[in-house]
Image (cartoon, grey):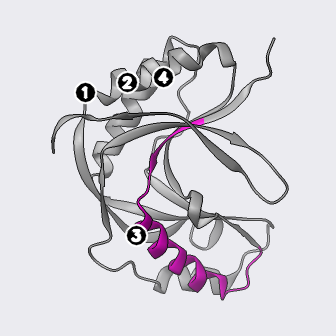
Amino acid sequence: MRPPIRAFIAIELDERVKRELSLFQDRLKTSEADVKWSDPAHTHLTLKFLGDIQPEIVDDVEEAIARTAIKFPAFHMDIGALGAFPRIEEPKIIWAGITKRANFLAEIAEQLDEELKSLGIEKPDQGFMPHITLGRSRTETTSKRLAELLENTHVPAGLSQKVERIALFRSELFPKGPVYHLLYSVELGRGEA
């Protein structure tokens, strides 16, 4: 039996959005907080983290993604405020949030959950909040400076991109950080919302 594949379903970001997000990361890095920052070249919006899946079901996962994609038209999403989980005062995961079409992304994620249920891929316990991960704290120590920067760094109006595809990625973990391999990509349905 072949080893499992660590995989996730995501929206790829265009180069302009990645460049802008890397500028926010640069500003947040001035806090000198102990954060593992995401590689801007690989930044994406995760719709569904699958974890380790058997290679034998990859085709079925691709079909589930295709059945979901056809139900939704292309749309524009706006990237808005910066924030953190569980909260800005205790930043464990630092993110950029979606302000326009967040509900649309949530509907896509919900549909993916429904399609993947028959493959034994469980729906997460917590609700889906569309966001783009910029970094993860490596320590339990809270950085007051990072919290201040998160509250006072504003995303410029108009940071937007057209979403036209859903993609499946394989993730390989290395000491320097994960490497992502595109396995499958499919266009959303016809038309535009």
**Tag 2: amino acid:** Ala
The part of the image, by quadrant, that contains residue 4 is top right
Q: CA distance from mark 4 to mark 1?
A: 15 Å
Q: Which mark is residue 71?
A: 1
Above or below, comparing residue 117 to residue 37 in the picture: above
Write the residue at 40% across / 71% down.
81
Q: CA distance from mark 3 to mark 1?
A: 27 Å
Quarter of the picture holding the N terminus: top right
Percent x, y for residue 110? 39, 31
**Tag 1: amino acid:** Lys
Q: CA distance from mark 2 to mark 4?
A: 6 Å
Write the residue at 50% across / 58% down.
132
- Name the residue beneath numbered marker 2: 66
Say which label, 4 or 3, has the lower sequence index.
Answer: 3
Q: CA distance from mark 4 to mark 3?
A: 28 Å
**Tag 4: amino acid:** Glu
Q: In the image, 190: left or right of 67?
A: left
Q: In the image, 17: left or right of 138?
A: left
Write the residue at 61% across / 74% down.
89
Q: Which residues are magenta?
A: 8-34
Q: Secondary structure at mark 4?
A: helix
Q: How many marks?
A: 4
Percent x, y for residue 184? 50, 32
Q: Which mark is residue 96?
A: none
Front: mark 2 or 1: 2
Say which label, 4 or 1, has the lower sequence index.
Answer: 4
Q: Are marks 2 and 4 in contact (CB under 8 Å)?
A: yes
- Name the residue beneath numbered marker 3: 16
Instruction: Give whichever of 190, 47 is nearer the camera.
Output: 190
Q: Secondary structure at mark 3?
A: helix
- Name the residue beneath numbered marker 4: 62
Q: Is residue 106 magenta?
A: no
